[in-house]
Amino acid sequence: MFLADTIYVLNGPNLNLLGLREPEIYGHDTLDDIAGQLEDRARELDLEIDLRQSNHEGHLIDWLHEAQARGARAVLLNAGGFTHTSVALHDAIKSIKTPVIEVHLSNPHAREDFRHISLVGRAVRGTIAGFGALSYMLALEAAARL
């Protein structure tokens, strides 16, 4: 089954703790809050959202492959800490044709030095970062226009 009107929204480690974990950096919105906002806007754009979260790198890789196999329009990916460490995610993104947009709530370049390098960012179509939950909405708007 092809899902050309579906946007996958994949979230990596610790994003299940949004709203609780360091709200001064990541904000007070939970992942469920962000999902609701995305679903509302997606309906207006005649799109569907398939939002998932895992603390396991392999799940994210499998879901990237699935997005390609199922014909998703795009993937919004917040890889969390894997952003800076995962050659495997980089390679998975490079191996699919489905456009991937990297999303971050905070601005990694305004944080610790180790966050300044994104292995994921070297493989994606574009990156939106630093706008809190709005980063996801901006990425959805971009994906809708691809």
Image (cartoon, grey):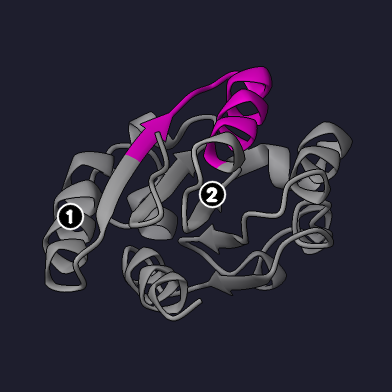
Which residue is the site of mark 2?
78
Q: Is residue 29 visible?
A: no
Residue at image point 67% right, 64% down:
111
Q: Is residue 39 visible?
A: yes
Please state which amino acid type lies under the numbered disc 2: Asn
Which residue is the site of mark 1?
39
Name the dominant secondary structure of the magenta segment.
helix
Residue 107, image x, y percentages: 58, 70
In the image, is residue 59 above or below residue 121?
A: above
User: Who comes first in sequence, dot 2 or dot 1?
Assistant: 1
Please state which amino acid type lies under the numbered disc 1: Glu
Q: How far apart are the alpha carbons under marks 2 and 1?
A: 17 Å
- The picture quadrant where one finds residue 140 is bottom left
In the image, is residue 65 above or below residue 138?
A: above
Determine whether the residue tagged by mark 1 lies in a helix, strand or loop.
Answer: helix
Residue at image point 25% right, 61% down:
47
Count of marks overlaid on the render: 2
- The picture quadrant where one finds residue 101 is bottom right
User: Magenta segment: does it hold 62?
Assistant: yes
Instruction: Please tell me which residue lies in front, 115 or 99.
Output: 99
Q: Is residue 112 left or right of residue 47?
A: right
User: Magenta segment: does it hold 11?
Assistant: no
Residue 91, image x, y percentages: 86, 41
Residue 41, image x, y percentages: 17, 68
CB-based contact (under 8 Å), mark 2 and mark 1: no
Determine whether the residue tagged by mark 2 lies in a helix, strand or loop.
Answer: strand
Q: Which residues are magenta?
A: 51-67
